[in-house]
Image (tube, rainbow, N blue to C red):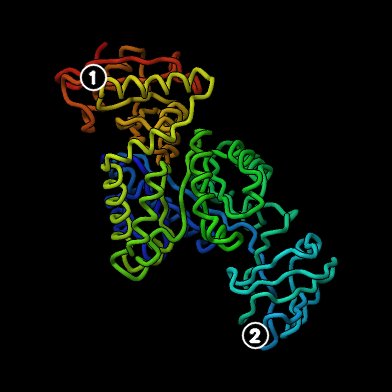
Amino acid sequence: MRRLRRIKILATLGPASSDLAMIRRLFEAGADLFRINMSHTPHDKMRELVATIRNVESSYGRPIGILVDLQGPKLRLGAFAEGAVQLQNGQTFTLDSDKTPGDATRVHLPHPEILAALRPGHALLLDDGKVRLIAEETSKEHAVTRVVVGGKMSDRKGVSLPDTDLPVSAMTPKDRADLEAALVTGVDWIALSFVQRADDVIEAKKMIRGRAAVMAKIEKPQAIDRLADIIEASDALMVARGDLGVELPLERVPSLQKQMTRMARRAGKPVVIATQMLESMIQSPVPTRAEVSDVATAVYEGADAIMLSAESAAGKFPVEAVSTMNRIGEEVERDPTYRSVITAQRPSPESTAGDAIADAARQIAETLDLPALICWTSSGSTAVRVARERPKPPIVAITPNITAGRRLAVAWGVHCVVAEDARDQDDMVSRAGQIAFRDGFVRAGQRVIIVAGVPLGIPGTTNMVRIASVGPEGDAHM
């Protein structure tokens, strides 16, 4: 199951894609890891999906990552006496702490933290931004607003607050219960929704205690201002363009996507581009030309992964959506201009031994036109460091740790193999050649480059580069 592209594909599971046969087909079509959205998935179903993915993984012998996406704080209006009202431009509309069903002049807002944090001039976006209010008078009991963009409003529609820094955790009691259930089940990645600050990530990490890696979803304007700190606290980043495009002007999203992709790469953290990538394929077997260009842009930018949401979870053509993404990735990466774009964006190596080694290994591999760059990695950090360099040859990561292998499913260009740890340096070099030979990366007589940390098995000690020749049986020797 060797992929012919470097960018990874993250597919969301749902009603259209929850049985063994379909998950197997999605994996074969190109999905490298799977997302379980806890907004729509009870614990029993989550456990069933994880077991099914592990079943597929064992039959292919290739690590598959599982990401559980926590719902985060969903802010909603209360109910209306008539079920719905029509808000007119220019009218006054009040949000208050009174639980009485609302009417055309007021409605209950069951979030005292919003009323406490709102200030005059702050915007409130209702129902994914379809209705826009501006706060004119605020107190802990009510907020009097003016309707700037009117429209129909009905029970329990969502509320977004692009200007307001809410003193709320990114994790609700539901999220904490979902998180614990996911960790006990043994998932690989936890995605945190509506992250506003690095403390949100740190709080989650205290609960997780290393049992999974943490991906911060960037979908709030407040997070943009604190991006460097959030990236530093996180293990990976997701550009969640849906909510980001509600709370910020839509025209800002593409430039923010580029900035986040480059910042994450500079920090050596995987970055996932998400939301509406092939949206029309929920209903159609082919995407629009604009969607193809959008996916291609993420590939050209050097993102680690691209994500399907409803397209694979609830759409009519889940397999076609994955295979379309797969073909776009392959085609872009064949384009002669792709390498020049990726190379132009390469950040300078950090002043650490591991980054210097990764940069040197990439240069050697490209100078000698080697067919593979092989990493022995215990924690996965060596492979992530090498992936940051976006080398021309494929990266083959060999790890004795299945957990590290599954987490690497999101990392750009990394083909991961779980194998027994090397006994010594000679064994490491020999088996590196055998594994790359077996998986079709090298032929007898070719040379490969091997990156590792010595002594073996100690995480974070990337300090060795070897060039080896591959023998007729695939074993390599220096």
Q: Secondary structure at mark 2?
A: strand
In the rendered structure, which amino acid carries the disc numbered 1? Arg
- State the image coordinates of residue 8 (x, y, percent, origin top left): 37, 45
Nearest to N terminus: mark 2 or mark 1:
2
Q: Nearer the viewer, residue 428 or 442?
A: 442
In the rendered structure, which amino acid carries the disc numbered 2? Gln
Residue 18 visible in the displayed image: no
Tell me the number on the disc at residue 371. Answer: none
Check contact, mark 2 vs mark 1: CB within 8 A. no
- Residue at 56% x, 54% y: name it: 70
470 relative to 388, above or below: above
Q: Quadrant of the C terminus?
A: top left
- State the image coordinates of residue 190 (x, y, percent, origin top left): 53, 47
433 relative to 264, above or below: above
Residue position for label 2: 86
Q: Residues within 10 Å of mark 1 (few under 14, many from 20)?
A: many
Residue position for label 1: 447
Report which quarter residue 108 is drawn in: bottom right
Q: Nearer the viewer, residue 266 or 47?
A: 266
- State the image coordinates of residue 73 (x, y, percent, origin top left): 65, 59
- State the image coordinates of residue 288 (x, y, percent, origin top left): 33, 64
